[in-house]
Image (cartoon, rainbow, N blue to C red):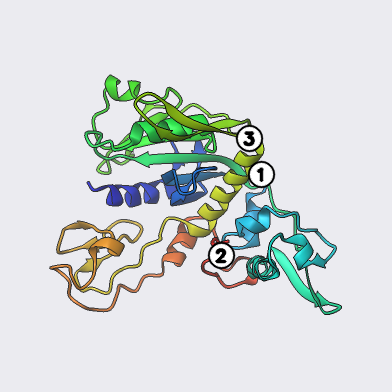
Amino acid sequence: MREYAFELRLCAHLETADVPGVGDASVVSRQLGTSVHASGGRIVDTVCVLPGPEFGDRVALTSDTVPPAVLDTDVPIGEYERVTRVFDGPPERARSLADAGAKTGFLDVTRRDGQQVVRQTTRYPDWVGGLIGVENKPDLGRPGDLERQMRHDASLGVLDYAVVATESHVTRAHLNRLPDDVGVWRVDFDREDPVEVIRAPERLDSTGPGLEVLDEHAARTDVRPVTAGEKARQRRRVVERAYGKGWRTFDLPACARVSTGDGDTPLPCCEHFGRVVDPASECGDECPGFEAADAPDVDLDAERERRTPWERDAGGRRRQAGLDQF
């Protein structure tokens, strides 16, 4: 099975099943960056967020991502303060961040004495119980940068657990190439319970300092220290993007050959190729099987709402787009 199809099917499974040996994944997302210093350096295939004590408060707050730059700023609760005093940078950026936070309902922005002022409407909830990263490698015969990726995850510790998921037969040699803390799952979607735990993951140190692997050479490995505070900020960014983004980031193509499959949740399935396809890279006029038609009438947000605690109109606000760009 191709990695894209494997990833979508595993996300669909984890969304309604416990993460083996770890707990309930109340939020499942995909393709999220976890690097602290190397921007875009480490993209984790699948990210699961375990619910914390105030998860219900996060559900009620907003369906969208609260912009990380807003959460990184000490915005007063209750008392208004001038936007340009709260947010660093040019006034245009300060106003843009305040407006983005207000669209989610997390900030209250108004004008007083001719100045734009801002306050938090509520305390940010303690809603995260754990963070699991899954690297999807259906074929271990083509591992790519798997070993380096897993060393990065284990030494950095932004995640609480790191796992490799594969369809391949897993040998002792495969296990020995991975850090001892990294778990391994063998996945067979033809089984009633598709995930077999070959090695359970050990909890990583997500609260203390870490080391980020930046690059590896024949004679050396380049690393950079990461403080506990830097890790905490990056974890918050990851979980917020996971919450707002989810895993259904595809659009179903406007093609007569596309269907939503016969599973419990819609996936982009192609009659021409006989498999799940990546609409962004495989569909369109240049596809030999393309036949223009209306796209399947499927509401992907409604599917997420049906299968998880997430509420698309939480806080009485319509779902926004692009709020994690800041």
Q: Give the quarter of the image for residue 219.
A: top left
72 relative to 231, above or below: below
Q: Give the quarter of the image for residue 277.
A: bottom left
Question: Counting other residues with Cα less than 10 Å from the Cα at mark 1, is it few (<14), some (14-19), or many (20 or more)?
Answer: few
Residue 130 appears anywhere in the view: yes
Question: Counting other residues with Cα less than 10 Å from the Cα at mark 2, is it few (<14), some (14-19), or many (20 or more)?
Answer: some
Which of the two discs, 1 and 3, sits closer to the camera?
A: 3
Residue at horizontal 53 percent and vertical 29 percent from the top = 204
Mark 1 / mark 2, whichever is N-terminal: 1
Mark 1 / mark 3, whichever is N-terminal: 1
Q: Which amino acid does label 3 sit on?
A: Thr
On the rendered structure, is 207 left or right of 144?
right
Query: Looking at the rendered structure, which numbered label has been put on residue 53?
Result: 1
Of 192 and 279, the residue lying toward us:
279
Which of the two discs, 2 and 3, sits closer to the camera?
A: 3
Mark 2 / mark 3, whichever is N-terminal: 3
Badge 3 element: loop
Q: What residue type is labelled 1?
A: Pro
Q: What residue type is labelled 2?
A: Leu
On the rendered structure, is 298 left or right of 130?
left
Residue 225 in picture, x, y percent from top left: 57, 32
Report how far apart the C-alphas of labels 2 and 3 lie in the structure. 27 Å
On the rendered structure, is 211 left or right of 42?
right
Q: Mark 2 points at which residue?
A: 323
Residue at horizontal 64 percent and vertical 57 percent from the top = 69
Residue at horizontal 55 percent and vertical 60 percent from the top = 324
Residue 271 in picture, x, y percent from top left: 17, 64
Q: Name the residue under label 3.
A: 227
Report how far apart the C-alphas of labels 1 and 3 lie in the structure. 25 Å
